[in-house]
Image (cartoon, rainbow, N blue to C red):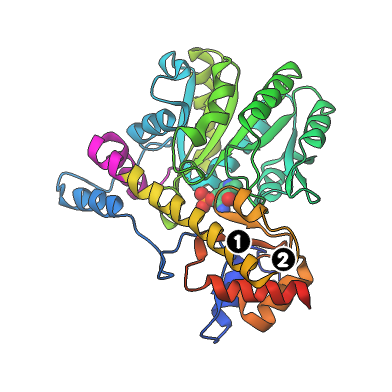
Amino acid sequence: VFSHVVRAPEDPILGVTVAYNKDPSPVKLNLGVGAYRTEEGKPLVLNVVRKAEQQLVNDRSRVKEYLPIVGLAEFNKLSAKLIFGADSPAIQSNRVTTVQCLSGTGSLRVGGEFLARHYHQQIIYIPLPTWGNHPKVFTLAGLSVKTYRYYDPATRGLDFKGLMEDLGSAPSGAVVLLHACAHNPTGVDPSLQQWEQIRQLMRSKKLLPFFDSAYQGFASGSLDKDAQSVRIFVADGGECLVAQSYAKNMGLYGERVGALSIVCKTADVAGKVESQLKLVIRPMYSNPPIHGASIVAAILRDRNLYNEWTIELKAMADRIISMRHQLSDALRARGTPGDWSHIIKQIGMFTFTGLNAKQVAFMTKEYHIYMTADGRISMAGLSSRTVPHLADAIHAAVTR
Ligand code: PMP
């Protein structure tokens, strides 16, 4: 009965790793997936995560019962504080509902399904380009996906004029997906002044912000700084949605731990919204897993662990920034033609190199360097040892 099923293509991002795993070359380099690697090229479990896990293991009173549909209450509370700020008036007036979801992706999906059921406008605008999973997540949630201009290939920076024009002509009430910081794949973020202009335009047109916060702390090294975009929207008293992920900033990728917050106008509305979120979640996966959320809660509740986390987080962010400088220096040393200043200017885990699909294919074939076809490279996958190899490959690709 399944013989008619056609083989689906590999996921454009995760498929890069599939191809990488098949390559026997000793010099192969995977810059596809956005997962942090140490200078030695190894995955990193944060020390603070190990400590929190040890605490959990030592606590014999802990059981493996189901969590409630909305997840671990303390985790939800602390997650809201992390993104909105400890003194957020929205939290103090109980206008926020936060539910634990399956990392960032699950939070986006639950938010999308809620909007499709309960929000009057079914159109969501996503940036062009954006993380490849966004259009699929929101389409399958039942929303109609449109794009707004975001990136200008000529400047390798923000197309602010295009962004403002497209949001300016969006239908009233449309949902707008915004990357809270460290835009993926471009590494290009609006300045604070530009965020303020975006906020004014969106509020005047009653556009509903849906923030995707997958890199808080990873962009600048400061958790508060990376949350500023979200906070200026919340400060005006209006509604918004936020999907948070702990994959990158705590290195909890495979634990699938994240949160969806919906900021409402009143506490009464927030309570009703939460009751409907439960109806979205219950038939989807019933309730979320307990382990990752317990790790996060243990770290966020304890001042010492929290401080230790911020230090480890900053070290990851700083290593990525240092990779940007090293790659830029290596290209300059080789006299590689073109302006590569965007490598340093772009923010977060990725550099949007500007290399085209042909050049990427050449680098994969000849240099065993794996990345997405749009020329996005994960700076977190680089090390001082591998920068020269990448620089050689880029140089060869653009001078060929
Ligand atoms: N949004 C963006 C922009 C991302 O880059 C990612 C991870 N690559 C996610 C969401 C979701 O990640 P996860 O589901 O692993 O938290």
Q: What stretch is highlighted in magenta?
A: 286-308
Type of amino acid under label 1: Ser
Instruction: Count the labels in the image.
Output: 2
Q: Which of 321 and 241 is in front in this view?
A: 321
Residue shown at 38%/24% (left/top)? 86
Answer with mark 1 or mark 2, whichever residue precedes in sequence: 1
Type of amino acid under label 2: Ala
Residue shown at 43%/35% (left/top)? 70
Q: Which mark is residue 328?
A: 1
Q: Which of 248 and 197 is in front in this view?
A: 197
Asked whether residue 206 appears in the rendered view, the answer is: yes
> Toward which corner of the image does residue 73 lie, by quadrant?
top left
Residue at label 2?
373
Residue shown at 15%/51% (left/top)? 58
Report the side of 361 relative to 247 (left or right): right
What's the distance in space between the residues labelled 1 and 2, CA to CA?
A: 21 Å
Q: Quadrant of the C terminus?
A: bottom right
Residue 142 picture location, percent across and down: 71, 40
Query: Dot 2: what SS?
Result: loop
Residue 196 picture location, percent across and down: 65, 23
Residue 348 highlighted magenta (yes or no): no
